[in-house]
Image (cartoon, rainbow, N blue to C red):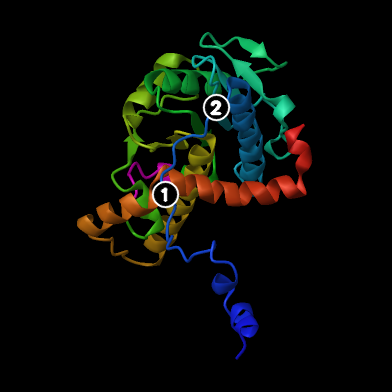
Amino acid sequence: MSATATANANPVAADPRHAPVRKFWFDEESAPARTFDEERRHRQERLAGAFRLFARYGFDQGLAGHITARDPEWPDHFWVNPLGLHFGGMRVSDLLLVNRHGEIVVGDGPVNQAAFAIHAALHEARPDVVAAAHTHSLYGKAWSTLGRTLDPLTQDACAFYEDHALFDDFRGVVLDTGEGARIAQALGERKAVILKNHGILTAGPSVEAAAWWYIALDNACHAQLLAEAAGQPQPIAHDIAALTHTQVGRPAGARHAFESLYAGLVAREPELLD
């Protein structure tokens, strides 16, 4: 065989700059250096995209539901959806900027009072949280009526193993930040909380993580509801569940999972960036 044929058969030989690499998982990455304006735009775009993805997953019942993103320059302000605008039509320009007093700084509104009451308290209690998501999704809502946290029944559910809590003091629609503070206290340092007789909530260090974890948590609720309806599920042992949590429960994996959905969404619906 000639040298030319050998090179054509082996692309590495043809271009030695492309040496083989071993990469099986997503490494944790530091946030890229962005200006306040660049980071704000990044969060706004992912937030508008998250609402549209939630609509595709059926998390858009009625007027209930909100996702927030902390503003990078004014950390006591957050971006949120206006009340009454369907998730499926959300655009960047539709988002509202709300301050810690519940006043709309940017946008026309109105703002969902429950969104302010829950998210203002949560963002204040958790400076590490960039985004939080809560809607009345069907399976999260159904699971919340049982007053239990989820079991580690599947690999996917292990993303939440010992990393989600139960808030079991439902008192009606959340209308003041005192109620939001109690939810934040129940959440603690975890990524999710089940609100008994209400639904589910997730929080994360990025819009991407909070949104993906919401999708994954509702899916885990669905899986356990099906498993318990079919028989007696056999949970994963503690040590294996704890190990699996470190493998599948990391923010980097959540970000990549979200971005894979977001890229296709933007390609189909570029107007969300308006």
Which residue carries the number 1 mark?
27
The amino acid type, in three-letter code, at marker 1 is: Asp
Q: Quadrant of the N terminus?
A: bottom right
Q: Is residue 241 magenta?
A: no
Q: Is residue 13 left or right of residue 268?
A: left
Mark 1 and mark 2: Cα distance apart in space: 24 Å
Look at label 2 and name its amino acid: Ala
Residue 189 x %, y %: 32, 31
Which residue carries the number 2 mark?
69
Element under disc 2: strand
The residue most toward the front is 3
Taking depth in this image into account, of 148 and 163 the one nearest to the observer is 163
Q: Residue 128: horizontal and vertical position, in percent?
A: 40, 26
Q: Residue at x 65, y 39 (%)?
A: 49
Q: Secondary structure at mark 1?
A: loop
Residue 161 visible? The answer is: yes
- Front-most of residues 98 and 273: 273
Q: Which residues are magenta?
A: 143-151
Residue 23 spot, x, y in % from top left: 43, 60
- Density class for disc 2 (Cα within 10 Å; few <14, some 14-19, many ≥20) is many
Q: Residue at x 38, y 24 (%)?
A: 126
Tell me: residue 7, above or below residue 55. Answer: below
